[in-house]
Image (tube, rainbow, N blue to C red):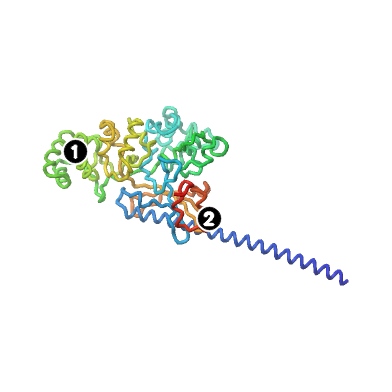
Amino acid sequence: MRGVVLIVAMAVTLLLAGLCISFGRSARVELLSSGHRIEQMQAEQIARGALQHVIAVIADSTPGRLDPSLLRAEAEVVDEGVFWLLHPNYTDDRNHGYGVVRESAKLNINTATSEMLMRLPRMTQDVADAIVDWRDGDDEVTGAGAESEFYMAQNPAYRAKNGAFETVYELLLIRGMTDELFWGEDANHNGVLDPNEQDGVASDPPDNGDGRLDRGLVDLVTVHSSESNTDGSGQQRVNINSTPMGQLRTLFTELLEEKRVDVVLPRVQSQRPYQNLLDFFVRAQLEEEEFGKLYDRISTVNAQTQRGLIDVTTAPREVLMCLTGLEASDADAILGARGTGAGHTHTGWLVKAIDAEKAVAIGGQITTRSYQYTSDIVATTVRGGAFKRYQAVLDATSTPARIVSWLDLTSAGWPIPVEIRQSLRAGEDVASLPRRVGGAIR
């Protein structure tokens, strides 16, 4: 009997020990899980704090004239973590760019003609025409495009929108659009050529292995670029084509030397109307400095809002090539003449950079301003245990800037060199992180 009791006691002891071990393991897993959830929430708040930082900097900037250097956030340290603002580096696909993207530096798919769309990399005529058909207000097929008759035959069926694109991701509904055309080779959307993006078909995404990042349309097109036809003080710009000469004299006297007013105004009166501001600059024979003083105060149209103008000071080569009549040599000349870009406050310098006739031809398609910005935010805790990544589009035509979209990109994976996160997990001082770019120590 005593032996039975001993055996039972041992069995109960072993059972209790097993339960304790199991409970301990469960408690440890729950503790680790809770810690990870806390770090996720911290990363979420860091990302949202980074967004508010961007909004605050935009609010403190001259409308349409945000200085890119103010938001070059590379490993920006905050109380409980660090964040980055990623920016596609259009001239170097081996190193990351940092900052916000001007939406006006992209081609607006709501206003671009089929001919302009066709000049985008790897664009095909059927896709360009299908884009036009998707946004137009009728069911008439454009060229090789597609309307509701085609889309209703798909599974699942849907209709052509026959209205403006609200997001560039609607392009994925267009007939002929492919992941390769839309996303390019940039699988994690970080703007850098990663090892899996240059190994052919060995791993996703499929790529041509040429050692160069083929960007998708997603980096080159927008639906958000627009600006009010008002000057820096919020006043309607003066239309030089229709404003009485007396009012023009008042404006010109305010901004130009008096002796030049008497020379310029007769030319303005005799040669009206003008196609665009560059046409005015050339035919009125203004000095570039004079044009710079007038640029923000005048217009050639009465429209309250101008949509789809391309920011010629920051647009990448691929977008510049979409401007009417420009050749590769012209795009390269513009890139060379503009230097670092956003410091130009007017377009007069283009007349020296490229042929004057070509400059005038694109004068109505370009701007030097931007009121909409994309911010690609990567945020992690100081221990690197969790991270969040969001893409925010902000519209600064109002103050504070309005959040147009907030897209979670966390599932695309960690987008910057993995060594950075490993350093955080190893307890490395975050102050050393900005020296790490493109996987190498600077």
65 on left or right of 213: left
Residue 351 is drawn in which quadrant? top left
Which residue is at the far top?
143
CA distance separating discs 2 and 1: 57 Å
The quadrant holding residue 105 is top left
- Quadrant of the image for the N terminus? bottom right
Q: Amino acid at mark 1?
A: Leu
Residue that mark 2 sits on: 386
In the structure shown, which secondary structural element does the residue marked by tag 2 occupy? loop
Please name the residue shown 68% across and 64% down the image.
23
Residue in the picture at 51% in, 33% down: 208
Q: Nearer the viewer, residue 340 or 65?
A: 340
Residue 178, position in %: x, y? 50, 35
Q: Which residue is mark 1?
A: 286
Neighbor class of circle 1 (other Cα within 10 Å; few <14, some 14-19, many 20+) is some
Amino acid beneath label 2:
Ala
Point out residue 201 in the picture as x, y percentages from the top left corner.
56, 35
Q: Residue at x 54, y 35 (%)?
A: 200
Q: Is residue 390 left or right of residue 29?
A: left
Rendered image: mark on residue 187: none
Asked if residue 237 lies left or right of residue 8, the reply is left
| Image position of 63 (left or right of 83) | left
- Secondary structure at badge 1 equals loop
Percent across and percent down for residue 50 are: 42, 55
- Of all residues shown, which one is farthest toward the right? 1
